Image (cartoon, rainbow, N blue to C red):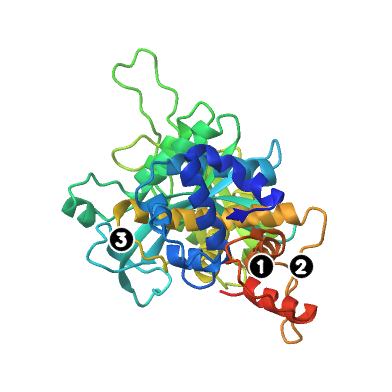
Amino acid sequence: MLTLPIEIITVIGPFAQVFSRRVWESAKVLLIGAILAPGKRTVTAALEVLGLKDEPQYQKYHRVLNRAKWSSLRVSQILLGLIVTTLVGLGVPVVLGADETLERRGGRKIKAKGIFRDAVRSSRQHTVYCAGLRWISMMVLVPVPWSSRAWALPFLTVLAPSKTTNERNGQRHKTSIDWIGQMIAAVRRWLPERALVLVTDGGLAAVKLGLRCARYANPVTYVSRLRLDARLFAPPGPQPASKPGPKPKKGQRLPALKTVLADPQTVWTTLTINWYGGERRCVEIVSGRALWHTPGYDPLPIRWVLVRDPLGKFTPCAFFATDQHATPTQILTWFILRWNVEVTFEEAREHLGLETQRQWSDLAIARTTPALLGLFSVVTVLAHKLTQTQPFPVRTTAWYVKTEPTFADAIALVRRYVWTEGQFVNSSPDTQVVEIPTSVLDGLIDSLCYAT
């Protein structure tokens, strides 16, 4: 039996309402085991690290993922509420980042796998394709007290098979844009009064998604990259009331942004902002309002920002927001936050064993990866709770001085707290007890806490 400290119960307790009592007891074991286990995040690894390798009813832990009835969407709603109430202040917009990631998996029994471009291994000159599962994850981009950068905390992740895979399995295909539209609709229902900002990369920029974000009674501000050859139009002019027929939805065609970039008459404004990596960078911008049009859809009102580097260190690029009153500085600040999504994906692979799980049933696959990504947020919230009255411990050595905590320190802090404050009563009565020096014990615990 596992008895958890009150601080951990306070954080994970709200999730109990999603499960039956028996399933919740097994789910708690998997949750704590996934935090403590180094290396692969399999069910057996979670049981072994908690001393349950001789548990005769081990199948009940597998059934939490592959058979038990509980709602992943409800878990996502509770996790979002936990993140917002803990780390996002009242009256502050909730900034959301959405992006795709590839889980490299093989196996004939995995029905949802397909062939996708591997963004991590590909470059501009060389494209790498890989077999695996494509996931779309939505995260809260929020500052944390111990870091100079914002952290991306996942709360909702969905499986997005390719069109070929869906046709093979007889399922209706949804594009990544369709999935993100459904995800933001769920978040809008869960947080009806909060101001929401959705940030995506240029590959997920679409008029269709922008129109969906703008249609709510409390619209969602949509921020992304904009192609330099995007079709931009002026608003329609006044029309005579006596003129028959439908009213025009857009005015005259405006010059493309690549034309604005090359025009020597363009007036540029110098702006100093926090760029990627936290460095202060001086850039030149020009901004305006327009209607972005794609054939088949109504025009989308946007505020666009064209950016170039006076030193020529990066290629000129453009961004947009569906809030036409947003300032260029705010639009750039929102978009730059998106990079933290990539950091979270990498940290989840390094410290939470993403891609090491081995389930093959459809239901277990659909639950396990979202659970591991959600665990990133749970660990972060736990670390925040544990450091409200004490400094955040950071592991440093003589050859590596770390200036601020990373996720490795966050999970190590939570592990140390569980190891030292939790009660594990799985040992047999005849277990031998050995006394060792405190310094040796601290070193062993430190090694366990930082194991990957």
Image location of residue 251, percent across then percent down = 40, 34
Tag count: 3
Q: Which corner quadrant holds the N terminus?
A: bottom right
Q: How far apart are marks 3 and 1 (CA)?
A: 30 Å
Q: Residue at x 59, y 57 (%)?
A: 336
Given this view, does label 2 or label 3 mark the residue nearer the observer? 3
Image location of residue 43, percent across then percent down = 44, 62
Chain-order first, disc 2 or disc 3? 3
Q: Which corner quadrant holds the C terminus?
A: bottom right
- The kind of residue tagged 1 is Ala
Label 2 sits on a secondary structure element that is loop
- The kind of residue tagged 3 is Trp
- The kind of residue tagged 2 is Pro
Q: How far apart are marks 2 and 3 (CA)?
A: 39 Å
Q: Residue 412 carries which label?
A: 1
Tell me if mark 1 has few (under 14), some (14-19) or many (20+) residues whose alpha carbon lies within 10 angstroms of its own: many
Q: Residue 393 carries which label?
A: 2
Q: How far apart are marks 2 and 1 (CA)?
A: 9 Å
Chain-order first, disc 2 or disc 1? 2
Tell me if 337 is positioned left or right of 175 in this view.
Answer: right
Q: Mark 3 points at which residue?
A: 360
Nearer to the camera, 229 or 34: 34
Residue 172 shows in the view? yes
Q: Which residue is drawn at 38% across and 64% down?
A: 103
